[in-house]
């Protein structure tokens, strides 16, 4: 308990500073009452979480608060995005008589049940003509992908499993329900409720604020070699492995409340792009550079090379979609070079430079072994994919035992390869279509508004850049935790943006023509 109190003091102090410094920017996009309500809930639930001996006490307090705040909030999507990582997304089975349990309950699902499902109910009753109406092609693809996941049972990735766990009708129903609350509900609510530029901007600002809180605790974790949320995760789940710290190049890999360092790195890489959009209205150079450096250093101390590349891609794509793309790309390249020179002067700079993928012979033994593991996974996956190209091989894990790591798992280090492995080219086509269809729709709106409304076009460019960066990062990470959630979040934001653009274009066509 003494350790938890010390961790609480640190997290509470860092959060108070971030909420105070970020307030002027957040209030550009949020109503002051909504902002203060979200902040107050953060400060109520944080001490409850650190002092709770189990997840159920936290849940008992959080559940009514989330329901109440979701009803009060003008933009429940912003509330949802801010609260996602107030605690680590660790799950505990809900007990049920005669069963091992109903399903894992974690903070993601708690927010979906308490904030998004009530919001979805209100949306269905709403007659707002501005939002997406009816069933879209992406809705159909989501349903198809959910059915594939429910019906094509993939046994769990368990060490020393003596017998293959069999599927059942009950399990199919459970999987379908979990896909509904984990994937379809977030997509539906975000794509329908963010029916204006202001709503999308507020959602992005809430995501950025959450990432600032994560970055601040991540930098502290790395500097003090002290992970602030692992004791809570172990206490709630009883899994001692969650308390083990991971190191790379002699430095602690920070993870804050994200669940693991790669998930944190993914969010901070995307936050880099979101901050480009938000920072354009910030006049103070100190504020702009202060928050930029905080996000960069938070990303750096995760020691995750894939998200570093993803952040670089995001920075390149944003200007490439705007006017004067060539000159902006040149300036960006010069800025990146100057940043590398700056990082090289830091105490950890040499280790960072050696870990970059284009540095010959770079990286330590851990990094090089990770690269070798990824190559082996790609080779063996392709062999199995060729044998079952259409609907995949749901028993593929039993054929990849040679790739099981010391942690006891077979790490599916490439999302697209693993989806193809288990669900075939049919499954991966549906999976990619879920995000590409709204992305292409958003791209058309960016091009159409580039001259007439550059601010609206810039918002779309940032969303597209974050999606492209996400796709790049998923090549080198598993589809779990934050990457798995935000894949659908940004697909929904892109769909909402495209709908706004189509609605604006239709309004222009209907407007009466004036004579010269």
Image: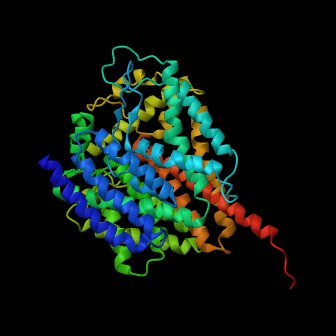
Q: Nearer the viewer, residue 292 or 86?
A: 86
| Placement of 471 over or under 151, stated as above or below | below
Residue under the point 35% across and 57% down: 41
Q: Quadrant of residue 459?
A: bottom right
Q: Can residue 467 be spotted in the picture? A: yes
Q: Nearer the viewer, residue 496 or 448?
A: 496
The location of residue 63, given as percent across then percent down, is 39, 45
Compared across the picture, whether 210 is left or right of 501 comes to left
Furthest toward the left, the residue is: 2
Q: Can residue 259 be spotted in the picture? A: no
The location of residue 407, given as percent across then percent down, is 27, 32
The location of residue 152, given as percent across then percent down, is 54, 24
Residue under the point 34% across and 61% down: 40
| Placement of 110 over or under 168, stated as above or below | below
Q: Nearer the viewer, residue 33 or 384?
A: 33
The location of residue 58, given as percent across then percent down, is 30, 44
Q: Could you tell me which quadrant the C terminus lies in?
A: bottom right
| Placement of 386 over or under 207, stated as above or below | above
Furthest toward the top, the residue is: 163
Furthest toward the right, the residue is: 515
Residue under the point 21% across and 50% down: 227
Q: Nearer the viewer, residue 478 or 150?
A: 150
Q: How many numbered markers are drawn?
A: 0
Compared across the picture, whether 52 is left or right of 289 comes to left
Furthest toward the bottom, the residue is: 516
Residue under the point 35% across and 29% down: 403
Compared across the picture, whether 19 is left or right of 333 comes to left
Q: Quadrant of residue 259?
A: top left
How is colour applied across the structure in the image? Answer: rainbow
């Amino acid at each position: 308990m003494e350790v938890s109190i010390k961790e609480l003091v640190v997290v509470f102090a860092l959060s108070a500073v971030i909420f105070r410094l970020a307030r002027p920017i957040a209030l550009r996009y949020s109503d002051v009452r909504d902002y203060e309500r979200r902040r107050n809930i953060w400060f109520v639930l944080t001490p409850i979480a650190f002092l709770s001996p189990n997840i159920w006490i936290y849940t008992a307090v959080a559940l009514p608060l989330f329901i109440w705040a979701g009803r009060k909030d003008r933009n429940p999507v912003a509330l949802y995005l801010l609260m996602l990582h107030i605690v680590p997304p660790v799950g505990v089975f809900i007990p049920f008589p005669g069963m091992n349990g109903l399903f894992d309950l974690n903070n993601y699902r708690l927010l979906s049940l308490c904030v998004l499902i009530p919001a979805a109910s209100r949306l269905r009753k709403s007659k707002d003509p501005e939002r997406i109406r009816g069933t879209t092609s992406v809705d159909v693809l989501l349903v198809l992908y959910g059915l594939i996941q429910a019906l094509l049972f993939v046994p769990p990735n368990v060490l020393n499993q003596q017998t293959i766990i069999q599927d059942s009708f009950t399990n199919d129903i459970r999987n379908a329900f979990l896909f509904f609350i984990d994937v379809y509900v977030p997509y539906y609510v975000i794509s329908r409720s963010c029916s204006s530029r202001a709503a999308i901007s507020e959602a992005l600002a809430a995501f950025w604020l959450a990432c600032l809180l994560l970055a601040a605790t991540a930098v502290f974790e790395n500097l003090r070699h002290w992970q602030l949320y692992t004791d809570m995760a172990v206490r709630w789940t009883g899994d001692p492995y969650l308390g083990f710290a991971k190191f790379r190049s002699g430095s602690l890999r920070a993870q804050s409340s994200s669940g693991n360092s790669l998930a944190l790195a993914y969010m901070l890489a995307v936050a880099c792009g979101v901050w480009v959009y938000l920072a354009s209205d910030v006049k103070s150079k100190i504020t702009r550079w202060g928050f930029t450096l905080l996000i960069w250093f938070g990303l750096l101390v995760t020691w995750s090379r894939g998200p570093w590349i993803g952040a670089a891609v995001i920075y390149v794509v944003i200007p490439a979609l705007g006017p004067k793309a060539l000159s902006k790309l040149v300036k960006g390249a010069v800025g990146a070079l100057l940043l590398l020179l700056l990082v090289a002067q830091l105490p950890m700079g040499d280790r960072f430079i050696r870990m970059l993928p284009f540095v010959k012979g770079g990286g330590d033994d851990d990094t090089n072994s990770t690269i070798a593991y990824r190559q082996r996974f790609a080779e063996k996956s392709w062999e199995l994919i060729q044998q079952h190209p259409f609907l995949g091989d749901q028993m593929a894990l039993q054929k990849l035992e040679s790739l099981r790591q010391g942690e006891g798992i077979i790490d599916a280090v490439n999302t697209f390869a693993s989806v193809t492995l288990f669900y075939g080219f049919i499954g991966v086509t549906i999976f990619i279509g879920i995000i590409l269809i709204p992305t292409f729709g958003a791209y058309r709106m960016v091009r159409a508004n580039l001259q007439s409304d550059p601010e609206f076009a810039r918002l779309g460019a940032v969303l597209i850049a974050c999606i492209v960066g996400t796709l790049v990062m998923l090549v080198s990470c598993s589809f779990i935790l934050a990457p798995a959630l935000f894949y659908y979040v940004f697909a929904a934001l892109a769909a909402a943006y495209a709908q706004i653009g189509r609605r604006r274009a239709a309004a222009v066509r209907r407007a009466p023509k004036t004579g010269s």
